[in-house]
Image (spheres, grey):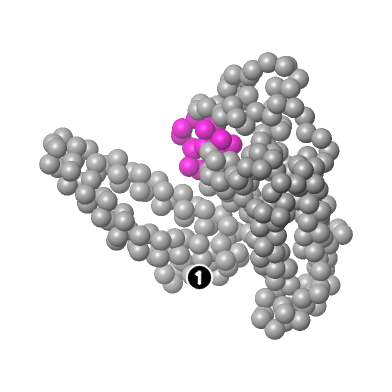
């Protein structure tokens, strides 16, 4: 770790000794500590705070989120992190303020003129959030560092005693996949995923590879399946073969090899080592 890096990092330096010992940058050490702490603290909402008032649960989410943000980003960079998170996470709030203003139900066309699919009406915000609700949602410690991204109504349901909503696919589906037509759906989803993570080249290489694998798998199925559906025995053979390869062989090939290959740049972050890895493999 260089002196320049240490001097410019504004987050907590309490674990500098651990960073030096394990050979990782201090910001990554703090990030890992914050993520583990978030997992542990989230259990507060399962039992100890399960029957607490929504206001208190909001306050706990906000307070821990602010402390975690200060620990990882410091006085200066936490502002930039909050701005980034507000812009990225408040998609549902931005689109549904119009619903509050007009006091009527919006059609999918009114929500977004480019929408070709459907937008789940359950994501519609029925009232403007209070300042506590808004900032607690924006800075909730469970999702502050790297997600998962959730809609505002999902967060409110969780605070009022429901389960924490399931992760990121639903958000990507509503925000990127179902909007703008079918032509570039996969590109939009993987592109948004890359932008959400940051601006290191490795992120974009990983999600580009993931998109490539997804498109290739779909095209292979489109080309292969019609060859087997014209008769019942062939279709049964195809379904059985698909089940076996998916559950057994493809579990190893896809998960252990293809995804590992695709995600190495996600860890390396930088362009030169990522290209070197792809060049060697």
Span colored in magenta: 174-188
Q: Which residue matches tag 1?
A: 276
Q: How many marks?
A: 1
Residue 139 place in picture, x, y as percent: 76, 49
Q: Nearer the viewer, residue 87 or 125?
A: 125
Residue at 40% from the left image edge and 46% from the top image edge = 215
Secondary structure under tag 1 reads helix
- The question of residue 120 being in magenta is answered with no
Residue at 47% from the left image edge and 60% from the top image edge = 262
Q: Look at the image and tell me in which quarter the N terminus lies.
A: bottom right
- The question of residue 183 being in magenta is answered with yes
Residue 25 place in picture, x, y as percent: 70, 73
Query: Is residue 192 something one can see in this rendering?
Result: no
The residue furthest bottom is: 21
Q: Nearer the viewer, residue 204 or 247?
A: 247
Q: Nearer the viewer, residue 140 or 102?
A: 140
Determine whether, in the image, residue 184 is placed left or right of residue 157. left
Residue 2 place in picture, x, y as percent: 76, 78
């Amino acid at each position: 770790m260089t002196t320049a890096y240490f001097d410019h990092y504004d987050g907590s330096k309490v674990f500098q000794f651990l960073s030096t010992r394990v050979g990782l940058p201090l910001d990554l050490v703090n990030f890992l500590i914050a993520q583990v702490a978030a997992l542990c603290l989230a259990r507060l909402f399962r039992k100890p705070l399960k029957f607490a008032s929504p206001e208190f649960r909001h306050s706990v989410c906000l307070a821990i989120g602010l402390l975690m943000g200060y620990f990882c980003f410091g006085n200066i960079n936490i502002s930039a992190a909050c701005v980034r998170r507000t812009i990225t996470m408040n998609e549902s709030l931005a689109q549904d303020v119009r619903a509050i203003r007009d006091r009527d139900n919006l059609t999918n066309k009114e929500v977004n003129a480019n929408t070709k699919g459907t937008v789940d009406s359950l994501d519609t915000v029925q009232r403007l959030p209070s300042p506590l609700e808004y900032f607690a949602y924006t800075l909730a410690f469970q999702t502050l560092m790297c997600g998962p991204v959730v809609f505002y109504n999902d967060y409110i349901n969780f605070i009022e005693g429901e389960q924490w909503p399931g992760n990121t696919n639903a958000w990507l589906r509503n925000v990127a996949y179902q909007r703008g037509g079918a032509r570039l759906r996969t590109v939009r989803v993987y592109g948004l995923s890359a932008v959400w993570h940051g601006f290191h080249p490795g992120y974009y290489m990983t999600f580009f590879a993931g998109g490539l694998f997804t498109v290739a798998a779909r095209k292979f199925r489109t080309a292969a399946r019609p060859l087997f559906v014209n008769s019942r025995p062939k279709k049964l053979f195809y379904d059985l073969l698909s089940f076996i390869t998916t559950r057994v062989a493809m579990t190893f090939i896809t998960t252990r090899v293809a995804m590992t290959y695709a995600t190495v740049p996600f860890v390396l972050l930088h362009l030169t080592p990522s290209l070197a890895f792809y060049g060697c493999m």
